[in-house]
Image (cartoon, helix red, strand yellow):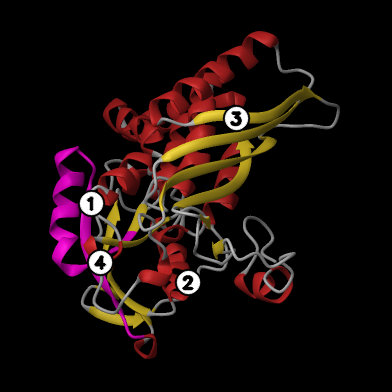
Amino acid sequence: MAPLGKITDDFFQKIIKPRLGARRPEVAVGPEQGIDVGILELGEYALAMTADPVFIVPEYGFERSAWFAIHILASDAVTSGLPPAFLSIDLNLPPELSDDDLARMWEVIHRECEKMGAAIVTGHTGRYDNCRYPMVGGATFMAMGPRDAYCSPKFCRPGDRILITKGPAVEATGIFAAMFPDRIEKEFGAAVRKQAEDVFFRMSVVEDARLAASVGVRDRGVAAMHDATEYGITGGLLEFAKAAGLGLVAHYDEIVMTPAVAEICRMFDIEPFSSISEGTLIAAVRPKAANEVLRRLQDQGILASICGEMTDAAEGIHAVTGGKKKPMEHPGEDPFWAAFFRALKG
């Protein structure tokens, strides 16, 4: 396993994947690296399910932290192409959390679910010794729709265009801006500080995925979507290709970049494309639909670009930078974590 962050693919393949409990015919898409959701086919309907920690950081402010927590949960579910539907949430809270702060958190969770059209259907809430921030529970978020309305890497084909929104290190930038705004302003000025702080509320692919799927899925448009979280765009592309059983080529010079990201990554000494990037959507789109997906995203003010394509598996997974093509390598460790803890130490 990696010292921090998600387990390695090798550990997953050897330990997790062979031991998945009972086999059920309703499971259309099960656990796999690079697939954000499981899919159940239930009669004429499909139900997408994802599980994640409930991540609350008091230093962000409880309202802002709760917004981030619910969008982390929803962002994986919506990569199915299905609309948000249900939330099951377990809150195991530290004793020092006040009733007022819990109420502020819950109001935001309710409000964001209501906006998305998701009902909170069950859960558990309590304060307990030895529970600490930021991991204060877990949740399952579900999306639901017609059986033929979901997308998944198994639908990808060679020639599908790769579309990426917002670019690299979105989450890294948003978190650094929330935690160290004064340092950023001292280094770059108020304008860059404001740009970086604005990135916080881009750490979600809920709207990106909705707009992409509105064109259609599978042969009508989007074959698959993936939220580039830990290990950033590079890790996300590698996971994406392996989950699809295909190769790909990505032109890094054509990937968009959100304002202030380059400055923040330089300040905290992290490589952008391998840094955590919740809010960056990677999508494989049929060639005939790619420009329309791009247009709908851009019309809503979401930065995006078509920057590569899926290829036959035998062609491998490659990155093109400065006109030079080379095999893509997994970062091994997300540079954000070490940089974040260095910054906390001053």
The N terminus, quarter of image: bottom right
Q: Position of residue 27 (x, y in %)?
A: 58, 62
Q: Is residue 327 visible?
A: yes
Residue at screen point 60% across, 47% down: 51
Q: Horizontal placement of 238 versus 319: left or right?
A: right
Q: Quickly name the residue at label 2.
A: 243
The one of 38 and 274 positioned closer to us in this rendering: 38
Q: Position of residue 163 (x, y in %)?
A: 26, 60
Check disc 1 and give the amino acid type.
Ala
Check disc 4 and give the amino acid type.
Asp
Q: Position of residue 172 (x, y in %)?
A: 46, 45
Q: Quickly name the residue at label 1.
A: 304
Q: Residues within 10 Å of mark 1 (few under 14, many from 20)?
A: many
Q: Is residue 186 visible?
A: no
Q: Against 321, is 128 above or below? A: above
Q: Quickly name the residue at label 3.
A: 121
Query: Which range of residues does the magenta coloring cover?
Result: 283-312
